Amino acid sequence: MLEHAWNETGPRFKAWLAALLLLIGVGGFCYSIQLGTGLGVTGMSRDVSWGLYIGQFTFFVGVAASAVMVVLPYYLHDVKVFGRITVVGEFLAVTAVIMCILFILVDLGMPSRLLNIMLYPSPGSVLFWDMVVLNGYFFLNLLTGWKVLEAEYTGIQAPDWVKPLIYIAIPWAFSIHTVTAFIYSGIPGRDFWLTALTAPKFLASAFATGPALLILISLALRRFTGFDAGQEAIRRLSIIVTYAMSITVFMIMAEFFTAFYSQVPSHMYALKYFFVGLYGGNSFVLISWIFAALCLLALILLLNPKTRGDEKWLTIACASTFIALAIEKGISFTVGGFITNPFGRVTEYWPTPIELGIVLGIWALGAFLLSLFYSLFVTVKRRSERGLV
Amino acid sequence: MQMLIAFAVVAVIAAAGYIGGAMPGLQFIFGVVLPLVAIIVFVVGFVRKVWSWAQTPVPFCIATTVGQQKSLPWIKQDKVGNPSDAASVIRRMAAEIFLFRSLFRNVKAEIGPNGWMGYHFEKWLWLFAVLFHWSFLFVVIRHLRFFFVPIPALVMGLEKIDGFLLLDLQPLFLSGILLLVGVSALHLRRVMIPQVRYISHGIDFVPLFLIAGIALTGILLRYVWPTDVVAVKSMTMGWVTLKPVLPANISPLFFAHLTLVSALLAWFPFSKLMHMGGVFLSPTRNQRANSREIRHVNPWDYPVHTHTYAEYEDEFRDKMKGCGLPVDKE
């Protein structure tokens, strides 16, 4: 079955894979520099010890968790239209988890000591549990996605033990992002993160990001491969994005209210730093306003049923949602807690080219894996629809 | 039962090595004589076997094919599955030797609850075979460090990659672990799938136990009960330079490891493990599938006396005409 990811593809697809391989090579080269010199080649410092890598990790945990937004309606609420794309969601989750693990790996100063997390487990640490739930989620999705696709390929029902695993994967999806949020909100010294809203906000923004990405992927699949997820599936996904995005923005606004109405200094620092700069530190002002503008644009386009129903506008809305939240969760939220330290001082951070190169390489690797997964998926679908099972 | 005998054979070999290594009087036999004899048997046996295969005539075009043959220009040929030129044959061989392509194609027929039959991709044999063979290659290359001064850069580089992960600040060589995992999984597969167990003889289990034993003693020697590696190297260099030395403080466990390896080497040319050399020489893989493009005449064809219909008619034309039978030529 695996060979179908490759055998029936055209030259354009192969060129795309080659381009991605080149980018992966760039990432690998940058990583070899980091491995030789150490994390000093990144923009991170004593004060800002979590940077772009951890931000990206957080963001992609969200993407991984969001697979549940197609799996849950299909299996628990019998929303038939998602039946065609549950596997798309599961493979997205698998790829996202692989990217997460790679982001953690590149963030380790001594990656060769990786095994210590299992040799000397510390169940008191949220990070340990994050490792456990992420790996569990990876295998759950790989297994269920594979078995469901294989059932379609052979024309024989998937074995009985697959269903329970799918049901287990649903709460598991919530757990991975909750545990990731607890990594932040479990640190009492960092006021920006020390709020009970962190985990709900993570989930809400993940459920906006993931379905937005799924819509973009579905449109791309239809354009390049002829696989149609269906109008109704896209319409329903767009409603999910609308609700989730509204809730996300609402929660962010609520943070502003608490900080500024009550004038809590330690809560105001980071927010001030982002939007107007603080003590001369203003690296994030520009992208913070881009984030705000994209959020506004996405909300306007999503809340208006006319634009939401129009594929062109929907594409723009989904891209805005994805980019906005990639900025917020992919970097700002993470570094915000460190840049403004508990003493109300600012230590600037900005990723270096090498750091960006490594991140680019991991994105390319994700796109590479995803392309192969979807190539396999589309071919199997095509065969089963032609009756070639 | 046959499996238990195979296990007992391997256990006896290991025990012999252990005991031999523990007794100073026998150390020379197990540390010098046996390995050298094993290497000689291996090299000579291997060469003889390959030579005998190379001598065997292959008169027919018997390439096995799994794809569209070269045909009309608008029909797409499957170049790897059905190679018709040398470059495609090389690609096919490379895919076979490095990636085990024919194992990858393994499918399993299955009848579902609805009574339909389907074929699913049975990947475990391929996966564990790849894991096992590549790990074994890595392990063998790493062991070259015992036979070279200075140690080749290739070996050092491989060690660095293989031992990237640290176990208590000691490099953990993944290939060794994966070798044991791979061989155990292949063994389990043999035992657990009824059809595969049915076609397994006792002798099929011997290499599995032998290699598992080698991997296990190797892992124990490295991580649990280390021996004096410097002494081992002086011994191995003794073999290479043909000036045998027998250092004092080498543990009996090392002799068990060494004896198992010697047994594997000595038995290799006479066993199914010769697929290592055989894969290169299998006519069904290394021939061009051009039996329709070119007429392959069997060089051994005996000059048979034939009598074709045309000749027959020439001979009996008059008689045939006489009794009114139709003829081709008037």
Image: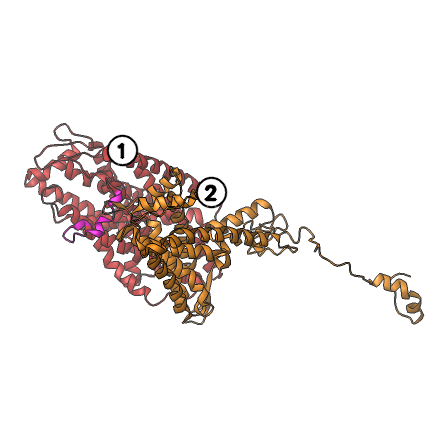
- Under mark 2, the amino acid is Arg
Kindly tell me whether residue A368 is visible in this rendering. no
Give me the C-alpha separation between circle 1 and circle 2. Answer: 38 Å
Spot occupied by residue A299 in the image (x, y as percentages of width and height):
24, 44
Task: Find the magenta span and give its range.
Answer: A111-127
Q: Residue at x 29, y 54 (%)?
A: B220
Mark 2: few/some/many CA within 10 Å (<14, 14-19, 20+): few
- Left or right, A136 with reference to B235: left
**Residue that numbered label 1 is attached to:** A37
Q: Residue furthest front?
A: B25
The image quadrant where one finds the C terminus of chain B is bottom right
Q: Residue at x 14, y 52 (%)?
A: A124
Kindly tell me whether residue A69 is visible in this rendering. yes
- Left or right, B293 with reference to B251: right
Front position in the image: B267 or A258: B267
The orange one among the chains is: B
Q: Earlier in the sequence, mark 1 or mark 2?
A: 2
Q: Chain of mark 2?
A: A
- Determine whether B2 is above or below A308 in the image: below
The red one among the chains is: A
Where disc 2 sits, the SS reads: helix
Front position in the image: A114 or B273: B273
- Left or right, B70 with reference to A74: right
Spot occupied by residue B34 in the image (x, y as percentages of width and height):
42, 54
Where disc 1 sits, the SS reads: helix
Front position in the image: B28 or A371: B28
As for residue B134 lying within the magenta part, the answer is no
- Under mark 1, the amino acid is Thr
Q: Chain of mark 1?
A: A
**Residue that numbered label 2 is attached to:** A12
Spot occupied by residue B54 in the image (x, y as percentages of width and height):
59, 52
